[in-house]
Image (cartoon, helix red, strand yellow):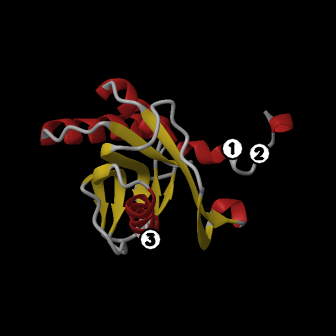
Amino acid sequence: MPAHQSAHHWVSWDDYHRAIESLVKIVHRSGWQFDQALCLARGGLRPGDVFSRLFKVPLAILSTSSYRGAAGTRRGELDISSGITSTAGPLAGRILLIDDLVDSGVTLQRVQEHLRMHFPDVTEVRSAVIWYKACSVMRPDYFVEYLPENPWIHQPFEIYDDMSAERL
């Protein structure tokens, strides 16, 4: 399938890994220093892991979910986990919020509000995503690719969405 169609954006594993590394370079070149990486699960897990390793900062994980049904393609109400998982203690200082993409922008917006309300020791939050869609209500601080036509992004790990362990 072609890599780009107006309604679809297909991403191979190689493209996905290169995009994560490109995002790392963009943040690094900005010169901004952060104390912790906070990834949004599930889409931000892989990029968050890479950021944590390369920048030598603790990785925190916050689970969020809004896509359900139809193999994860139908958007519903946003759920934000009540807790953050981290071995570095409570979130504090400068936080880089990492996800794979910003679609509507509601998740990034609501998570930043959640952090302001529940983590008073957080002094600054910036966001980093691979893909930034034009339909988003907010612009991430760092992104690799702006998508003016708002395509559905087909990421390589989605092959597991309609599969079970028995089918491997």
Q: Secondary structure at mark 2?
A: loop
Residue 62 in the image: state x and y as whole percent: 53, 49
Q: Residue at x 83, y 37 (%)?
A: 167
Q: Residue at x 72, y 66 (%)?
A: 69
Dividing the picture into quadrants, the one containing residue 65 is bottom right
Residue 74 relative to residue 127: left or right: right
* Cα gap from disc 3 to disc 2, whole angstroms: 29 Å
Q: Which amino acid does the dot numbered 2 rest on? A: Met
Q: Residue at x 29, y 42 (%)?
A: 23
Closer to the camera in the image, 61 or 71: 61
The dot on residue 106 is 3
Closer to the camera in the image, 55 or 69: 55
Badge 3 density bin: few <14, some 14–19, many ≥20, Cα 10 Å: some
Q: Are marks 3 and 2 in contact (CB under 8 Å)?
A: no
Seen in the picture, residue 118 relative to 39 is either above or below; the reply is below
**Residue to which mark 2 is pinned:** 163
Seen in the picture, residue 95 relative to 115 is either above or below; the reply is above
The first of marks 1 and 3 along the sequence is: 3
Q: Which amino acid does the dot numbered 1 rest on? A: Tyr
Residue 128 relative to residue 166: left or right: left
Q: Are marks 1 and 2 in contact (CB under 8 Å)?
A: yes
**Residue to which mark 1 is pinned:** 160
